[in-house]
Amino acid sequence: MSMFCYQCQETVKNTGCTIKGVCGKNEEVAKLQDLLIYTLKGISDIVVKGKVDISKYAESNYEVLSSLFMTITNANFDDGSIERQIRKMLSIRDELRKSVSADGLPDAATFVADSREAMLDKAATVGILATENEDIRSLREMIIYGLKGMAAYAEHAKNIGKENPDVNHFIYEALAATLDDSLNADDLVTLTLKTGEYGVKVMALLDEANTSKYGNPEITEVNIGVRRNPAILISGHDLTDLEQLLEQTKGTGVDVYTHSEMLPAHYYPAFKKYDNFVGNYGNAWWKQVGEFESFHGPILFTTNCIVPPKSEEVRKRIFTTGATGFPGCPHITADTNGKKDFSEIITLAKTLPAPDEIETGTIVGGFAHNQVLALADKVVDAVKSGAIKKFFVMAGCDGRMKSREYYTEFAEKLPQDTVILTAGCAKYRYNKLKLGDIGGIPRVLDAGQCNDSYSLAVIALKLKEVFGLDDINKLPIAFNIAWYEQKAVIVLLALLYLGVKNIHLGPTLPGFLSPNVAKVLVEKFGIAGINDVDADIELFMAQ
């Protein structure tokens, strides 16, 4: 076995990638990512056992977030950048260790691997399968995957200037706990729910960061056609990168289009002042291989969701920043003030043709919690009158598997008196369908990016209050969620912490769930998979 990874939904046979990742990462990248995570565990153990005051180590805290983020599926394929990050984290680890007794510290806090070969040799002994007990391994990995999603959201918030020290403390605590062999399965289940608790906190933090700087999302029609100007396509999730790109392209004659999870940026008032912020191009992340060819201009990846390009011509137009990386693609870093110079991208854009039009029209979004709560009276009246029988939360991720056509068919077959609440790129399975409205309320309410699943939780909690219910599960809301990567894991854990039960998860249950851990989730929280569309709709409507 040259590698082992089962952190995403598309892992081979839902058991694990052992030769090359379905995502496209090779053996060396997989092993270096394992070693990076192991290094973070060592740092965390030093922090916890040494009672280190992390408030004095702001740069280290940020690098821990970035390191976790780099290992999210489809974020970074550049073995060189991961190796450099390991070396940086080992330096931070060794500096922290100077003020702490080495007695009782685990191997992760002391190992030395100077050369690339030594790193790979070490990685082969500290990966996922190093934990022999299947259930302990399953729980440890679920916690780590939740932390990866948490770190992504925390880094976005930090980039806007918002930070929650408690979240940083918890990340160290939880990473250190995954080295503690004295913790049994019950202890780790408790820690898993605590991870969900901090997932709620970090999503609230990012919501505050985004809305305080860019305003509350509002109902917006987004153009999906094109203009005849040269253009840049921006993908990912980081709004600060988009803001800087728009500022630097202003007045240059270069248009900017969003791609995939950057679509919800159009809903924020602050971005509507840019005349060159044209619209959204294409669909979910996995369709980029073809859509990037027809776009013609440069593509900037701000976060994960890179698909290794098949065309060398496309690869030459890809730029990365933040936690992302791809071999041979220019990587743009920030200066000490967080500023990034996108002039190389803009210069290239001016030499390239305008994008080909692949569709026309508009799509509507902007239904985050503030906007929906502004419509609360209308929504409540529709529920009380029976015009709306049920809400379906269909948030999460999209992916390549044919089985994901289930979600399009599910949306099409839902009764006309139901409304879909969505967030994340899963929406591309149905956000362009003509599903109509109920008394002026669109039947697809898009709250935004995957982190905006927090909005859906806020909406549900507010409706619970409005209807005077004592349990969120008594609301006419069903959860049928698609997942793909680790940000979806932290969203799921957050929902479980909030007490949401009977969540259906697909197109498959996570491969990292051992049979016993899966049994706990089923018995305690009512987690279930998906089946036949008609049967599932009948089941949901009867609940």
Image (tube, rainbow, N blue to C red):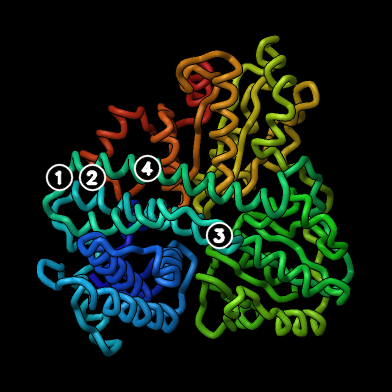
What element does badge 1 sit on?
A: loop
Q: Are marks 1 and 2 in contact (CB under 8 Å)?
A: yes
Q: Residue at x 41, y 29 (%)?
A: 499
Label 1 environment density (alpha carbons within 10 Å; few <14, some 14–19, many ≥20)? few
The answer to whether the residues at label 2 and label 4 have Cβ atoms under 8 Å apart is no
Residue 269, x across and y down, in percent = 78, 50
Element class at badge 4? loop
Is 123 placed above or below 129 here?
A: below
Residue wearing tag 4:
509
Whichever of callouts 4 and 1 sits on the residue coming sooner in the sequence is 1
Q: CA distance from mark 4 to mark 1?
A: 23 Å
Q: Which residue is mark 3?
A: 156
Q: Tell me whether the residue at label 3 lies in contact with that at label 4, contact meaning CB atoms closer than 8 angstroms.
A: no
Give the Cα distance between marks 3 and 2: 27 Å
Amino acid type, label 3: His
The circle on residue 188 is: 2
Q: Which mark is residue 166?
A: none
Q: CA distance from mark 3 to mark 4?
A: 28 Å
Residue 76 placed where, x, y %?
A: 47, 71
Name the N-terminal-most of marks 2 and 4.
Answer: 2
Q: Can you tell which of label 4 and label 1 is closer to the viewer?
A: 1
Question: Quadrant location of the N terminus?
Answer: bottom left
Q: In the displayed structure, would residue 180 be above or below residue 63?
A: above
Question: Which residue does the image show at 50% across and 33% down from the upper left?
Answer: 480
Query: Which mark is nearer the camera, 3 or 4?
Result: 3
Could you tell me residue 17's position as x and y percent?
A: 33, 63
